[in-house]
Amino acid sequence: MSKALRLGVNIDHVATLRNARGSAYPDPLRAALVAQAAGADGITAHLREDRRHIRDADMAALREGLAIPLNFEMAATEEMQRIALATRPHAVCLVPEKREERTTEGGLDVAADDNRLADYIAPLREAGARVSMFIGHDPRQIEASARIGAGVVELHTGHYCDLHYEGRFEERDIELEALRAGAAYAHSLGLEVHAGHGLTFETVTPIAAIPEVRELNIGHFLISEAVFLGLEPAITQMRHLMDAARG
């Protein structure tokens, strides 16, 4: 099993900062190019239905301006499928989406919607996109993702991170073990395993050490830390922690 661990940098919240003032800056593409120069292996952007941060023009600019892969996070709607097929990103990650949520609250329920999702992802796969399901570690969701033909699952690490910062360390460790088991099971089914959501300098090491995980997608913390360190040093430090976890 390869020890290589890729870092995808999510630049959504650069757009959040821009949109707070309704200005043209800071530019998400500029942030993506800084991340690329700092050693990011890919850029993730979530085009939400309400366009609260990333906008259609951002996706086009990212696709045109990047030399590293673009991962298009999106809800499984007809509108987003149409945009993804026109944008032709390297990868598409399907996520659950509710307008009232501040951020993605949990994993996609693939098992409850497997027939529709199998049909939904077929044209994306035919267009050459790697399709990922953003899910929890429930074996049913992992099995359903494999069954519908997704090549990748991204395990939701948000609950693990929340438990850490709430000081609920016994529960955190139980959640970490469940993530480890989920990653091993997904790998056994032939799925590539990614992980992400809420990861920080404090929480990334145990996740990065899971041998089946091939990619971490990290955004909000890196953009937040950039206020104090700068974006390039924040990414460099995260990369150092990830590499150290792989020994």
Image (cartoon, rainbow, N blue to C red):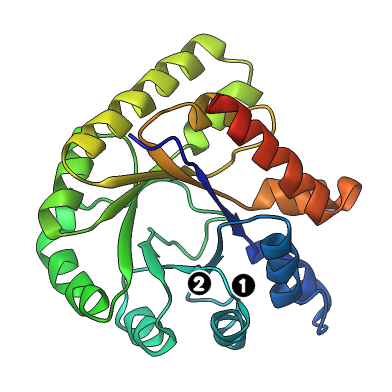
Residue 5 location (% of width, % of height): 49, 42
Q: Dividing the image into 4 quarters, which one contains the C terminus?
A: top right
Residue type at tag 2: Arg
Q: In whole angstroms, how far apart are the C-alphas of marks 1 and 2? A: 7 Å
Compared to residue 125, the image places residue 145 above or below, namely above
Q: On the image, numbered disc 2 is attached to which residue?
A: 48
Q: Residues within 10 Å of mark 1 (few under 14, many from 20)?
A: some
Residue 162 visible here: no
Relative horizontal placement of residue 130, taking residue 89 as reference (left or right): left
At a point 74% along the width and 54% down the height, the residue shown is 223
Compared to residue 50, the image places residue 95 above or below, namely above
Compared to residue 137, the image places residue 20 above or below, namely below
Q: Do the residues under discs 1 and 2 have CB atoms within 8 angstroms? A: yes
Residue type at tag 1: Arg
At a point 29% along the width and 76% down the height, the residue shown is 128
Dot 2: element: loop
Dot 1: element: loop
Q: On the image, numbered disc 1 is attached to which residue?
A: 52
Relative horizontal placement of residue 117, taking residue 200 as reference (left or right): left
